[in-house]
Image (spheres, grey):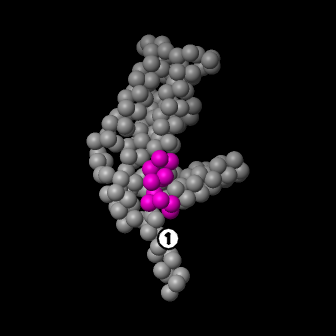
C-alpha cells in the first residue's frame, strides 16, 4: 500500500462504505433527504467517471443508475426515489457486513485488510480486527435505521407536498405541461 495513514486507510473501505450506506438508509426515510442524497451520489458518480475514464463498465453502470435516479425522481412525487436510496444504502451496508465476514472471519482469502492491520498493529489477530469492524458496521447499519425513524416523522401526504415543492417531483410535469401549452 502506498500513501495515506494505514491505521485509517485499511479499515476505511469497510467502515467508510458502511457509514455511507447508513447515511443513505437515513435519507431513505424522507423524500427531500433522498433528493439531496441523490444529488450527492450523482456528484460522486461524476468523480468516479473522471477517475475511471476508460472503463466502459463504469460509464454504462453509472448512466443506468443516473437514469434510474431521474425516473424515480420525476414519477409519483419522488416516492420511488426514497426506496431507491434506501435500497442502495441497505445493499452497501449488507455488502460491507458480508465482505468483512468473508474476508476476515471465514478467511476465504490468504491476506486481507484485517490481516495487514493485525500485522501492522502487532496486537490481536486478523479475526479480532474483522470481528471489531463487523460490530462497527452492524452498529452503523442499525444507527442508520434508528436515525431515519427518529429524524423523519412526516406523513406520506406531508412528504408528497414537500417533495413537489423541493427540486421538482410530480408537479414538474404539471409545470412543464403549462409551459408547453403557453
The residue shown at (37%, 32%) is 142
In the figure, 136 relative to 169: above or below? above
Magenta residues, dominant SS class:
helix
The boundaries of the magenta stretch are 74-84
Using the rendered view, name the quadrant where residue 50 is placed: bottom right
State the residue lying farthest toward the bottom: 182
Q: Is residue 173 left or right of residue 50?
A: left
- Residue nearest the viewer, comparing 46 with 151: 151
Q: In which quadrant will I find the N terminus?
A: top right
Q: How crowded is the residue under tag 1: few (<14 C-alpha within 10 Å), some, or many (20+)? A: few
- The image shows residue 146 at horizontal and vertical percentages of 32, 36
Using the rendered view, name the quadrant where residue 132 is placed: top left
- Residue nearest the viewer, comparing 71 with 105: 71
- The image shows residue 157 at horizontal and vertical percentages of 34, 57
State the residue lying farthest toward the front: 157
Callout 1: helix, strand or loop? helix
The residue shown at (32%, 41%) is 149
- Is any atom of residue 43 visible in this view? no
The residue shown at (51%, 43%) is 88
- The image shows residue 128 at horizontal and vertical percentages of 45, 15
Q: Is residue 136 left or right of residue 109?
A: left
- Residue nearest the viewer, comparing 175 with 112: 175
Q: Is residue 131 left or right of residue 110?
A: left
Q: Is residue 29 magenta?
A: no
Residue placed under numbered mark 1 in the picture: 173
- Is any atom of residue 45 visible in this view? yes
Q: Is residue 75 magenta?
A: yes
In the figure, 73 relative to 21: above or below? below
Amino acid at each position: 500500500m502506498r500513501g495515506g495513514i494505514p491505521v485509517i486507510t485499511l479499515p476505511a473501505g469497510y467502515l467508510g462504505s458502511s457509514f455511507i450506506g447508513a447515511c443513505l438508509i437515513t435519507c431513505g426515510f424522507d423524500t427531500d433527504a433522498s433528493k439531496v442524497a441523490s444529488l450527492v451520489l450523482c456528484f460522486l458518480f461524476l468523480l468516479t467517471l473522471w477517475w475511471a475514464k476508460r472503463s466502459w463498465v463504469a460509464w454504462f453502470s453509472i448512466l443506468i443508475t443516473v437514469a434510474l435516479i431521474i425516473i424515480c425522481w420525476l414519477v409519483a412525487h419522488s416516492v420511488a426515489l426514497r426506496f431507491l436510496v434506501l435500497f442502495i444504502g441497505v445493499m452497501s451496508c449488507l455488502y460491507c457486513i458480508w465482505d468483512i465476514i468473508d474476508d476476515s472471519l471465514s478467511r476465504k482469502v490468504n491476506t486481507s485488510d484485517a490481516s495487514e492491520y493485525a500485522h501492522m498493529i502487532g496486537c490481536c489477530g486478523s479475526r479480532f480486527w474483522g470481528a471489531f469492524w463487523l460490530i462497527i458496521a452492524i452498529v452503523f447499519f442499525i444507527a442508520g435505521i434508528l436515525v431515519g425513524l427518529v429524524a423523519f416523522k412526516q406523513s406520506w401526504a406531508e412528504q408528497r407536498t414537500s417533495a413537489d415543492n423541493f427540486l421538482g417531483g410530480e408537479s414538474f410535469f404539471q409545470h412543464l405541461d403549462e409551459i408547453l401549452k403557453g
